[in-house]
Image (cartoon, rainbow, N blue to C red):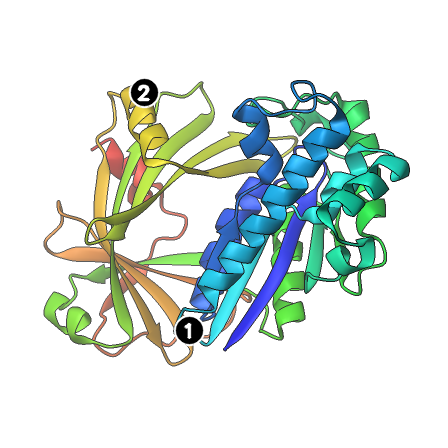
Amino acid sequence: MEVKKIVITGGPCAGKTTAMNRIQGVFTKLGYTVLFVPETATELITGGVAPWTCGTNVEYQVCQMQLQLEKERIFTQGALTMPKEKILLVCDRGALDNKAYMTQEDFDKVLDIVGHNEVELRDSYDAIFHLVTCAKGAEEFYTLENNGARTETVEQASALDDKIIAAWTGHPHLRIIDNATDFEYKMKNLLDEMTSFLGEEAPRDIKRRFLIDYPDIALLESMPNCQRVEISQTYLVAPEGEENRVRQRGVDGNYIYFQTKKRNGAGNKRIRLERRLSKDAYIRLLMDADPSCRPIRKTRYCLTYKNQYFEIDVYPFWNDKAIIEIEQSDESAEIIFPDFVNVVREVTDDEAYKNLTLAKI
């Protein structure tokens, strides 16, 4: 059994929420059980415990540090009870992030109260991945709208980003993911760095879709290398040129929920923002469903075949066809389809087979 504890950190509006969703998808496919320790500052501040509500900033930082460390302890304790070979424990910020929000003198006071030293805390994590705030190099995408605990201006966010990097400097595996390219490539860089650290192959990032004849469902459900997932995707009312949707994903009553927003950026860039939702938040957002679209419900069969990972989507309104998808790192690489799948043609760029189009039928 192997438990790796890593930190995803960064300045305000750096893409951490989207990164968490990508991490879950990629590393689950690579055989990891992925656990997430939620960001402590956001939990406390949105709950009413904040630097400006506590007696002093030091008193608040002690609360945050103690809760952060206790959550990590409980998650690690739980991970060690799981009968899994590979567990990835992902912390949405770590203990050293606190240092960026106080003077060295105050930070030393906090460490003394909680009974830890800086090096011990910093090196308790296996790796640190810092996502640079979009306030540095992608200012047009900086926003306060997707985090109620965020209050920084662009200038403050940039300065805070530098402080967070400084706080983690000295860790044996600190990687900084900047904004030198577009957001999708930023996410790819993060996943490449993580897979390299974990000793895994680089993640696949080119999705191709093919129309196939309706598959043998009984065969799929009998295969040990195939897992069924029920998906319900609802499109919400969105401004012209934008796409907003929520998704329920799971099986047998156990579900997780996501919201995805897409919009056009500078040039030909397509900006994609994702966040995980609570069940209550998901239900509230369903009230904003686009009346011109029906919910898309599909059964997805996740299938491994000859070291490839396929997803077969079966829709209830089709009884003669389905869609099979695969992600590749090289679009020219040969795809070896399962011998029980009859491919009709590729529909990767065919608008008629995109989910949003299907929702409007």
Q: Measuring 13% from the left and 45% from the top, which residue is drawn there?
A: 317
Q: Quadrant of residue 134?
A: top right
Alpha carbon distance from label 2 to label 1: 40 Å
Name the side, left or right, on which 25 lies relative to 302: right
Task: Using the image, determine if residue 308 lies above or below residue 64.
Answer: below
Q: Considering only order in the chain, which callout, 1 or 2, is on the residue closer to the N terminus?
A: 1
Task: Using the image, determine if residue 183 lies above or below residue 320.
Answer: above
Q: Nearer the viewer, mark 2 or mark 1?
A: 1
Residue that mark 1 sits on: 84
Task: Using the image, determine if residue 249 lies above or below residue 210.
Answer: above
Q: Is residue 53 visible?
A: yes
Q: Measuring 49% from the left and 39% from the top, which residue is drawn there?
A: 274
Q: Is residue 331 visible?
A: no
In-front residue for pair 69/326:
69
Give the residue type that dot 2 points to: Asp
Quadrant that contains the C terminus: top left
Residues at discs 2 and 1 in contact (Cβ within 8 Å): no
Name the side, left or right, on which 360 lies relative to 155: left
Q: Quadrant of residue 304?
A: bottom left
Where residue 14 appears, as percent x and y from the top left, is 67, 38
Q: Which dot marks residue 288?
A: 2
Q: Which dot marks residue 178?
A: none
